[in-house]
Image (cartoon, rainbow, N blue to C red):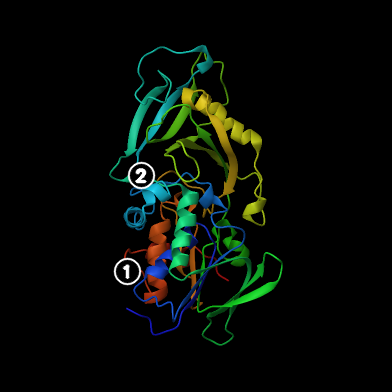
């Protein structure tokens, strides 16, 4: 299947979504590198934003239900095709909501074997499984994104580091995209001709398209090298201090054990604290500031429930911003925004993925590649995600 129409596709945003779109465009049956061009335009660095700093959970049971199962399947296929278990740490995991009772672990604890051996004895008060090895997996987000971008480039996609400044349109009655203006790292102004533009700029999308309603919660996280092996249990805890612990004001950070990978030669644990809206979105990913106390809050909570984490080495303290349509309850389906922008031929959105960006990255790449080359998604019914349901009139 080769498109008779020449396609010059510019993808704005080099995160997991943009890289996945580039990958699947170069694998689409209609893609002919001698006819079509695929350009991935990233302002700072590939995976420089939340795609390099997320937890990396991939779940068949994620939201939205119209996209998550496809994406879970495609993540598994990508790992099988390219050795993702080694290249980006793809593996299946257990997921659970747990109630943990924080202790002062420096006082020691009894020798009763805990249910999860890297938690302190007596800490685990309840365990509610929300995912198992059949429907839950994980990846290292930075390694997934950079490798998928590399694989796209190997099939002909061009990667340009430059900041998109404007999308240009035709002036006739049939409004369509014509080009993308951007500035290079040296400050020169350049232009890319385009028949199709996919805006996958995460929380920065409204800087180019103000009619797209996104807010940008900030999240802090840490990466710890534990002192002993950590089983693959992804935990979403509620941590409450024991009466005699002397602890107070603890947060309940998410906990993601990770296997050794190309970044770290031993197991690590990624842990993320709650979102906040305290600091506005900066101009670019390389200007995101880290609030040290918010990272300390995470390590303090971990130190009250797990000896291998209490005594482990903190390798990274970091922060990132997510593209969020609006705050919502766990399990509530709100977006993402994926599809054609009304009134403009060749303009596509792939943003607003919030906490499920990494999980839905592969599926988003598949359906957007089908939209660009075939006019509509074929692998999943994603009409409920179309921008017409979300964008403001303009």
Residue 137 point in image, percent of width and height: 36, 45
Q: Can residue 306 be spotted in the picture? A: no
Kindly identify the residue that appears in the image at 38 percent across and 51 percent down: 84
- The image quadrant of residue 23 is bottom left
For this view, does 390 lie left or right of residue 181? left
Element type at mark 1: loop
Q: Is residue 200 above or below residue 115?
A: below
Kindly identify the residue that appears in the image at 64 percent across and 33 percent down: 293
Q: Earlier in the sequence, mark 2 or mark 1?
A: 2
Task: Tell me if label 2 and label 1 are in contact, CB under 8 Å.
Answer: no
Kindly identify the residue that appears in the image at 65 percent across and 39 percent down: 291
Q: Can residue 114 be spotted in the picture? A: yes
Q: Is residue 136 above or below residue 126?
A: below
Residue 139 point in image, percent of width and height: 42, 47
Neighbor class of circle 1 (other Cα within 10 Å; few <14, some 14-19, many 20+) is some
- The image quadrant of residue 82 is bottom left
Give whichever of 27, 198 is nearer the camera: 27
- In the rendered image, which residue does mark 1 sit on? 378
Which mark, by number, is residue 67? none
Residue 46 point in image, percent of width and height: 55, 57
Which mark, by number, is residue 91? 2
């Amino acid at each position: 299947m080769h498109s008779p129409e020449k396609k010059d596709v510019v993808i704005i945003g080099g995160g997991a979504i943009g890289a996945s779109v580039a990958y699947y465009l170069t694998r689409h049956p209609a893609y002919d590198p001698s006819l079509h061009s695929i350009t991935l335009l990233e302002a700072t660095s590939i995976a420089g934003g939340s795609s390099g700093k997320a937890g990396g959970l991939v779940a068949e049971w994620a939201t939205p239900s119209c996209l998550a199962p496809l994406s879970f399947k495609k993540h598994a296929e990508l790992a099988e095709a390219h050795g993702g278990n080694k290249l980006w740490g793809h593996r299946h995991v257990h997921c659970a909501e747990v109630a943990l009772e924080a202790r002062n672990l420096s006082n020691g604890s009894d020798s009763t074997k805990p249910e999860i051996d890297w938690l302190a004895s007596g800490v685990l008060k309840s365990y509610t499984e929300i995912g198992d090895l059949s429907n839950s997996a994980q990846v290292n987000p930075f390694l997934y994104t950079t490798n998928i971008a590399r694989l796209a480039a190997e099939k002909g996609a061009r990667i340009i580091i430059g900041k998109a400044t404007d999308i240009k349109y035709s002036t006739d009655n049939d409004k369509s995209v014509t080009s993308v203006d951007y500035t290079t790292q040296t400050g020169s102004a350049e232009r890319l001709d385009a028949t199709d533009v996919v805006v996958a700029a995460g929380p920065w999308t409204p800087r180019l398209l103000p009619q797209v309603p996104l807010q940008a919660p900030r999240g802090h996280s840490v990466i710890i090298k534990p002192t002993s092996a950590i089983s693959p249990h992804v935990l979403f805890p509620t941590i409450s201090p024991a009466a005699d612990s002397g602890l107070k004001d603890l947060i309940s950070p998410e906990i993601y054990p990770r296997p050794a990978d190309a970044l770290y030669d031993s197991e690590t644990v990624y842990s993320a604290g709650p979102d906040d809206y305290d600091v506005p979105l900066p101009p670019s990913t390389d200007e995101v500031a880290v609030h040290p106390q918010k990272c300390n809050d995470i390590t303090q909570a971990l130190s009250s429930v797990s000896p291998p984490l209490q005594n482990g080495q903190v390798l990274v303290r970091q922060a990132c911003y997510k593209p969020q349509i609006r705050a919502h309850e766990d399990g509530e389906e709100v977006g993402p925004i994926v599809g054609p922008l009304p009134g403009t031929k060749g303009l596509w959105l792939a943003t607003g993925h919030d906490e499920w960006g990494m999980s839905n990255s592969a599926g988003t790449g598949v359906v957007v590649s089908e939209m660009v080359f075939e006019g509509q998604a074929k692998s999943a019914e994603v009409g409920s995600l179309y921008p017409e349901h979300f964008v403001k009139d303009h």
